[in-house]
């Protein structure tokens, strides 16, 4: 059976964002089962899922009640669309989300995932401005290194050259501004410099042509860049000054990831739209959404006005039933509170690794953190792309997995190890993370030193 699965995976499955050639002589890791913070592969090996299966499974694996909710819904009404019709679960979930979302974020446009949510939010921003008599407003501002998805609009927002460049030309109107990675700023730089760069970009583009700014509360791409104090308040002022909408891309940062239902609550700002996915259903079914403030929906509520956009599966009844059951679990177990109570300890464990020569920075918020790996801690010198390839793909990712920890090693910015465990994780898992990361990162720094001296020789 297991041999068959391997052969079939190699023969038929097109894996996403994967160098499939690297599995020519190695097994594809096949995850077959999950329970709590752990998943199991086809050979019965257990792994701590330190990434919540790509920042998704917030309530943890193996919750039968979400499966039961899906089964009950499929029996009652497997599918109906939200195009001109509605069904009870999409109505109930939209109402529940509106009740949890801060301020006047009261209307929910469902999608099947994050890229669709970002795509929809940009289109809605354009449609909103057109409806308000400003049809020239079409540009979207986002940050360098940020990941906002892969469909052509969302990809335009994504600020990662390697992902964008092969698919150009992209959607016209994408503009990129600096991110908030202050680890790499000169010390005397104004803390709100990156916020002010957004205003410069708006003025340069011509404010009357700019539709929206899209930002994550904590930026994933590049490794959990947190905002400076007052950053989002400054951005909100800038957006208001120029009539530009603020979209908070919370595909990762909502549903408790930062200790709140929504990431914007943690940093105290009021977006015009929130894009979300992943943790909205803890990924027990594919679901995403754009949650809009009342004033965004208002122009579409009268006469013949229409937002001419939709997806067959946006707000699928089974996914919405799962979304409702997911919120039940999060409320019953107060998972946002659990994250707020335990994030300090999680951070303490990661900070304790700072004594290792390869650990340059530890940053993040809630249950969403990254460790930046450096060649020289004093100068913050980073690894070359060749060295980083050797470090991450030649050693770290395989070794961490072999020792039973799933986390993300990434060098789309500077090299990082990223952790985003299920929100139910606690002391036991934190200690396990440390017990695996410490020896592996120590060995990584020794290897890189040896490797660099060999390459110098
Ligand atoms: C902030 C953000 N936006 C959008 C997306 C795209 O979501 P999806 O992969 O569900 O299309 C992601 C995916 O990780 C994300 O992190």
Image (cartoon, grey):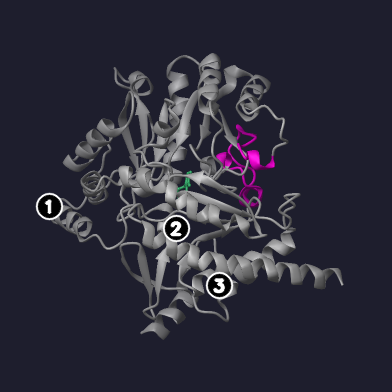
Residue 346 lies in the magenta-colored region: no
Q: Are marks 3 and 2 in contact (CB under 8 Å)?
A: no
- Label 3, label 1: how far apart the Cα atoms are: 46 Å
| Residue of label 3 | 399
Q: Which residues are magenta?
A: 156-184
| Residue of label 1 | 76
Tell whether 245 sits left or right of 450.
Answer: left
Q: Is residue 81 above or below residue 12?
A: above
| Residue 308 picture location, percent across and down | 38, 31
| Residue 351 picture location, percent across and down | 54, 52
First in sequence, mark 3 or 1: give its number. Answer: 1
| Residue of label 2 | 51
Mark 1 surroundings: few (<14), some (14-19) or many (≥20) residues within 10 A = few
- Label 1, label 2: how far apart the Cα atoms are: 34 Å
- Label 3, label 2: how far apart the Cα atoms are: 16 Å
Q: Front-most of 42 and 443? A: 443
Q: Are marks 3 and 1 in contact (CB under 8 Å)?
A: no
Asked whether the viewer can see residue 112, the reply is no
* Residue at x 43%, y 51% (from the top left corner): 345
| Residue 335 picture location, percent across and down | 30, 47
Q: Front-most of 62 and 29? A: 62
Please state which of the two labelled residues, at mark 3 or mark 1, is closer to the viewer. 3
Q: Is residue 443 above or below residue 50?
A: below
Asked whether the viewer can see residue 210, the reply is yes
Residue 163 lies in the magenta-colored region: yes
Q: Mark 1 falls on what kind of element?
A: helix
* Residue at x 52%, y 54% (from the top left corner): 350
Quadrant assignment, res 22: bottom right
Of all residues shown, which one is farthest toward the left?
Answer: 76
First in sequence, mark 3 or 2: give its number. Answer: 2
* Residue at x 42%, y 47% (from the top left corner): 343
């Amino acid at each position: 059976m297991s041999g068959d699965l391997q052969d079939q995976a190699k023969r038929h499955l097109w894996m996403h964002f994967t160098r499939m050639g690297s599995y020519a002589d190695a097994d594809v890791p096949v995850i077959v089962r999950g329970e709590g913070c752990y998943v199991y592969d086809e050979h019965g090996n257990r792994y701590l899922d330190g990434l919540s299966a790509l920042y998704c499974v917030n309530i943890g694996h193996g919750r039968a009640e979400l499966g039961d909710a899906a089964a009950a819904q499929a029996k009652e009404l497997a599918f109906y669309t939200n195009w001109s019709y509605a069904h009870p679960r999409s109505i109930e979930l939209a109402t529940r989300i509106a009740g949890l979302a801060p301020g006047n974020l009261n209307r929910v446009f469902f999608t099947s995932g994050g890229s669709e949510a970002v795509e929809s939010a940009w289109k809605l921003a354009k449609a909103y401005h057109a409806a308000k008599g400003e049809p020239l407003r079409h540009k979207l501002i986002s940050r360098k290194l940020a990941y906002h998805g892969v469909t052509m609009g969302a990809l335009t927002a994504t600020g990662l050259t390697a992902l964008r460049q092969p698919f150009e030309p992209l959607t016209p109107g994408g503009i990129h501004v600096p991110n908030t990675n202050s680890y790499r700023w000169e010390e005397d730089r104004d803390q709100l410099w990156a916020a002010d760069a957004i205003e410069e970009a708006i003025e340069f583009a011509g404010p009357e042509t700019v539709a929206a700014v899209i930002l994550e509360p904590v930026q994933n791409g590049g490794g959990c860049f947190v905002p400076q104090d007052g950053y989002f308040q400054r951005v909100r002022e800038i957006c208001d000054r120029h009539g530009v909408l603020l979209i908070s891309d919370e595909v990762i940062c909502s549903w408790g990831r930062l200790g709140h239902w929504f990431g914007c609550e943690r940093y105290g700002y009021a977006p015009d739209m929130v894009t979300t996915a992943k943790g909205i259903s803890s990924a027990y079914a594919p679901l995403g959404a754009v949650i809009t403030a009342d004033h965004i929906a208002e122009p579409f509520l009268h006469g013949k006005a229409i937002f001419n956009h939709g997806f067959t599966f946006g707000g699928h009844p089974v996914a919405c039933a799962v979304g409702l059951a997911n919120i039940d679990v999060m409320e019953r177990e107060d998972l946002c509170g659990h994250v707020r109570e335990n994030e300090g300890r999680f951070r303490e464990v990661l900070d304790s690794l700072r004594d290792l020569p390869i650990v340059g920075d530890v940053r993040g918020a809630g249950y969403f953190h990254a460790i930046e790996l450096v060649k020289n801690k004093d100068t913050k010198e980073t690894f070359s792309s060749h060295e980083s390839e050797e470090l991450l793909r030649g050693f770290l990712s395989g070794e961490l997995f072999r020792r039973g920890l799933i986390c993300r090693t990434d060098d789309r910015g500077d090299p990082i190890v990223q952790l985003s465990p299920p929100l139910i994780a606690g002391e036991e898992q934190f200690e396990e993370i440390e017990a695996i990361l410490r020896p592996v990162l120590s060995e990584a720094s020794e290897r890189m030193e040896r490797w660099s001296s060999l390459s110098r020789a």
